[in-house]
Amino acid sequence: MQILLAGSVVLPLIGALAALLPAPPGLKGKNPDQAVLRHGVTVTGVVFAATLALAVGFDHGHPARMQATTDLSWIPALGIRVHLGVDGISLPLVVLTALLTFLCALYSYFNMPTGPSPKAFVALILVLESGTLATFVVLDLMLFFLAFEMVLIPMYFLIARWGGAGRQAAAWKFILYTLLGSVVMLLGLLLIGVKSGTFDMVALATDNGPKAQLSHTVQLVAVLAVGIGLAVKSPMWPLHSWLPDAHTAAPTVGSVLLAGVLLKMGTYGFVRIALPITPDGMHTFAPYLAALAAVGIVYGSLACLALVRTGAKGDLKRLIAYSSVGHMGFVLLGIASMTPTGVNGALFANIAHGLITGLLFFLVGGLKDRLGSTDLDTLAGTTGAALYGRAPRFGGLLAFAAVASLGLPGLAGFWGEMLAMFGAFRPAAGLSRPAFLTFMALAGLGTLLTAAYLLLVVRRVCMGGTLKAPTSPQDTGGPATAPALPDLARYEYAAWSPLAVLTVLAGLWPAALLGLTNPAVQQLLGGGK
């Protein structure tokens, strides 16, 4: 188990170095580009298999206990250790990360984005995977910071070199926002380590451990500093403005990984660091976090409604990016409730958002490949998408992903948002219940607005006009079927169907995930008891 966990983090780095080397003559296939793309599929596939083996070997009877641990001294003078481990909170995120990266590598093998050499592309994807996996399994505050920052450079280059229009500005905005937030977060992490005498996250999470050395004032400053860095990555309103530009400019697989994996790093940090290590400071700031989360839910939905209206020239990728602001607002609201119900809902919503929004960005990328545009007015025009008639399987899958995203009962998007609102309905002792009831009401309004804009997207894109304009004086432009579009290809089935299947399974069998997270959350909020 130790080897599986450590190997899952290290193997992508080794694979990234190997991707930059010349391919052996017997493995080149038709050309070197094909060889390196196949290398990416192989490495990410092996990592995914290792995480599945880790999940199978995990002691599901004790999900609150750290398992597959490695604890080695690294920098003794500073007390920094290579400390790795997984519990019921981090294991689902590890498997989700490995799955999405593998599906992105598989998709890119058949549909490589336009840009420089695939060697650099594959290497960056693998470095990104390693950094993300490390973020979810390290148990040392300094290692957490290094892993947290490790993903920035590969994502910057994926956007800047393989992105679309406006990619340079979007990439710079992404890295400047996240770097500035990370500088403040580092100061907060150092404050915790210096005042407590350790950077070990497991020791700090227990009530009778080094956490006792953290005064109320220290906790307040630490939560504010660490929270800013985590909030930028979450992304929390009003620190979200880098997200729509980054998603709009990023290549398809970049958007999938950004929404499905990177956004989870910030909210995971709140659960793993802020809640157990600085509970007093978190208790003070929880109402403000909940208020910003509720505003983000409504704001994201209203922004999507503005983009979807006729004549707004709204971009479908940008719309889904703004929807992420709203969906991640539910995650932050659940965390801010500081209750087991709310935190479990937040963790469930994290996984559901990764599955559903990852699928949506895959579909939007496929739509752009077929029609050359993701402009909603273009897609809904009289010669627009009309997916039900022109590519029925593609249109059906897009409609499925949309209704899953709006939180239809029986699909994964429902449980996390419902539990987050239940947590706000009865927050932790000492938090203002009237205030949290207001936030819950705003979140409920957000669910209605979410349903409105997603159903409008389905109506405009899937049920768009099927008439074509006159092409000659004799052609009246009467009833005529628009030209057919390529329906789902085999590689698209392979890359997208796992996300659809897991969305259904998580919706019908939520206990599979909640059974992992709940004992760990109970122990986390109980000070290690």
Image (cartoon, rainbow, N blue to C red):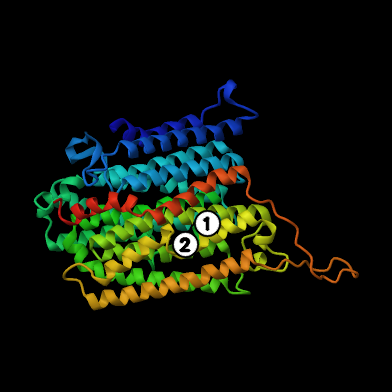
Where residue 206 appears, x then y in whole percent?
14, 50
Name the side, left or right, on which 369 lies relative to 15. Answer: right
Q: Give the residue at mark 2.
A: 405
Label 1 close to label 2 by CB (< 8 Å): yes
Relative to 137, residue 470 above or below: below
Local crowd size for mark 1, using a 10 Å CA cut-off: few (<14), some (14–19), many (≥20): many
Q: Position of residue 389 (x, y in %)?
A: 69, 61
Disc number lying in front (1 or 2): 2
| Number of numbered discs | 2
The kind of residue tagged 2 is Ser
> Which residue was labeled with disc 1?
360
Residue 474 position by quadrant: bottom right
- Mark-to-mark CA distance, 1 and 2: 9 Å
Nearer to the camera, 388 or 89: 388
Residue drawn at 56 percent across, 42 percent down: 108
Secondary structure category for the residue under label 1: helix
Q: Is residue 492 in view?
A: yes
Residue appearing at x 48%, y 41% in the figure:
102
Compare residues 432 and 20 and report the one nearer the observer. Answer: 432
